[in-house]
Image: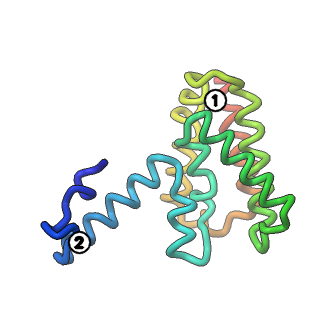
């Protein structure tokens, strides 16, 4: 439980102080980012998901979370709930499948690939103004290249 969860008024209500409310929102967003849940968090507040957000889970999640994520993406595809995101979901599923195939049950290898290639890719997409123009195929190519560099380098 984070400090913001404990920062409630004496009656248990959320703090009315706007600074505390903004701090709580910021902490929740950072926590979502670092835990690999930024995509789900962003879907609640934005109709469009930036490409960097689509690899956030790959860059930060642990093995069990990645396996659950791959299963949920597969379920969305088979249930026809991918909607307009179908092409992006296919890319996310493919990259997740390939990453899990590379690391098997090796959590240390997953963390090494994340740190050496996927997190830098994610950060470069955040910093790059052209990132919003990436297509699903561009993301697939960039994700594959990043994982290949991590394995070969």
Q: Mark 2 points at which residue?
A: 13
| Quarter residue 77 falls in | bottom right
Say whether residue 2 is left or right of residue 92.
left
- Residue 137 placed where, x, y %? 79, 57
The residue shown at (75%, 61%) is 88
Indicate which disc, 2 or 1, sits on the residue closer to the N terminus. Answer: 2
Q: Mark 1 points at which residue?
A: 150
Q: Is label 2 in contact with label 1 (beta carbons under 8 Å)?
A: no
> Which image quarter is the C terminus in?
top right
Q: SS at mark 2?
A: loop
Q: SS at mark 1?
A: helix
| Quarter residue 4 falls in | bottom left
Q: Looking at this view, is 81 or 121 the one in front? A: 81
The local crowd at label 2, few if under 14, some if 14 to 19, many if 20 or more residues have their Cα within 10 Å, is: few
Say whether residue 19 is left or right of residue 32.
left
Depicted 20 relative to depicted 104: above or below: below
- Residue 91 placed where, x, y %? 77, 54
The local crowd at label 1, few if under 14, some if 14 to 19, many if 20 or more residues have their Cα within 10 Å, is: some
Say whether residue 44 is left or right of residue 148.
left
- Residue 126 placed where, x, y %? 51, 58
The residue shown at (74%, 44%) is 95
Q: Looking at this view, is 118 or 110 the one in front? A: 110
- The scheme the figure's colours follow is rainbow
In the image, which is nearer the foreground, mark 2 or mark 1? 2
The residue shown at (33%, 63%) is 26
The residue shown at (20%, 77%) is 18
- Residue 31 placed where, x, y %? 40, 52
Say whether residue 11 is left or right of residue 32.
left
State how far apart marks 2 and 1 are (Cα).
Answer: 47 Å
């Amino acid at each position: 439980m984070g400090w913001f969860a404990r920062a409630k008024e004496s009656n248990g209500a959320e703090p009315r102080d706007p600074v505390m409310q903004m701090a709580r929102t910021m902490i929740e967003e950072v926590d979502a980012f670092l835990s690999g849940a930024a995509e789900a968090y962003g879907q609640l507040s934005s109709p469009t998901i930036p490409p960097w957000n689509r690899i956030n889970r790959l860059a930060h999640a642990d093995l069990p979370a990645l396996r659950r994520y791959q299963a949920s993406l597969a379920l969305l595809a088979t249930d026809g709930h991918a909607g307009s995101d179908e092409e992006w979901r296919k890319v996310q599923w493919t990259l997740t499948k390939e990453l899990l195939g590379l690391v098997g049950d090796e959590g240390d290898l997953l963390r090494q690939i994340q740190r050496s290639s996927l997190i830098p890719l994610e950060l470069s997409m955040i910093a790059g103004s052209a990132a919003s123009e990436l297509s699903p195929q561009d993301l697939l190519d960039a994700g594959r290249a990043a994982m290949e560099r991590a394995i070969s380098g």
